[in-house]
Amino acid sequence: MDRSDTLHWFAMRATYRRETKARDELAEAGAETFVPMRWTKRKVGERMKRVEEPAIHSLVFVKCSQPFIQHFKLRRPWLQYMCSMDCNGLRRPIVVPDEQMDDFIRASSLAEGEAEYIDPTTTPLTPGTRVVVTSGPFEGMKGTYQRVQGKRARQFVIQLEGVLAMAIQISPKQVEVITN
């Protein structure tokens, strides 16, 4: 990981359900952020109310430089890197490639409640066929076309390695297999 002013998408944890607070404070400080959100019904007083809440609690994606996020974290101990082990056994912050993150953000906004978010650490995903969507609102996105546990039909899956996956129902006619 370089410590320059290059912008990267960092996967972060905001403990104690402070993801919206982290998103707002980071945006105010000038960083680009993304928190996957979903609409749910919640009982407020005597009535059921439709509210927007984070789809995955404590997860925040931040696009900024390494020095910026290090400085930001100093005053906020509740904001932490999500890490993975490298080949030397050292923990490294998870950095999501720009293209994957752009597809993920676009798919999240287009899916509007149809997407299912999957934690790859608890739900193992079997390898699927690499595809690109050729038509419809998800046109141009790359991912895998595979069966997802608990779903009857095959799903289009966009996976952010080591962080999160999103499954969306798409017709087989809308995908084309990527050959390498």
Image: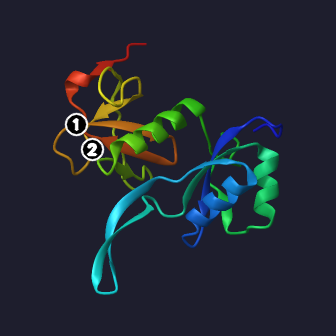
Residue situated in front as seen by the camera: 107 or 164: 107
Tell me which residue sits at (79%, 37%) in the image: 2
Q: Is residue 14 above or below residue 129?
A: below
User: CB of mark 2 within 8 Å of CB of mark 1?
Assistant: yes
Q: Is residue 163 above or below residue 45?
A: above
Residue 152, percent across and down? 16, 44
The label shown at residue 148 is 2
Residue under pointer 1: 154
Rendered image quadrant of residue 24:
bottom right
Rendered image quadrant of residue 158:
top left
Near mark 2 (Cα within 10 A), the count class, few <14, some 14-19 or many ≥20, is many
Q: Amino acid at mark 2?
A: Val
Tell me which residue sits at (61%, 58%) in the image: 23
The answer to whether residue 128 is left or right of residue 120 is left
SS category of the residue bearing label 2: loop
SS category of the residue bearing label 1: loop
Colouring mode (rainbow / by chain / secondary structure / one colour): rainbow
Q: Is residue 96 above or below residue 71?
A: above
Q: Is residue 78 above or below residue 56?
A: below
Q: Residue furthest top?
A: 180
Residue 38, percent across and down? 38, 57
Residue situated in front as seen by the camera: 136 or 83: 136
Tell me which residue sits at (21%, 26%) in the image: 172
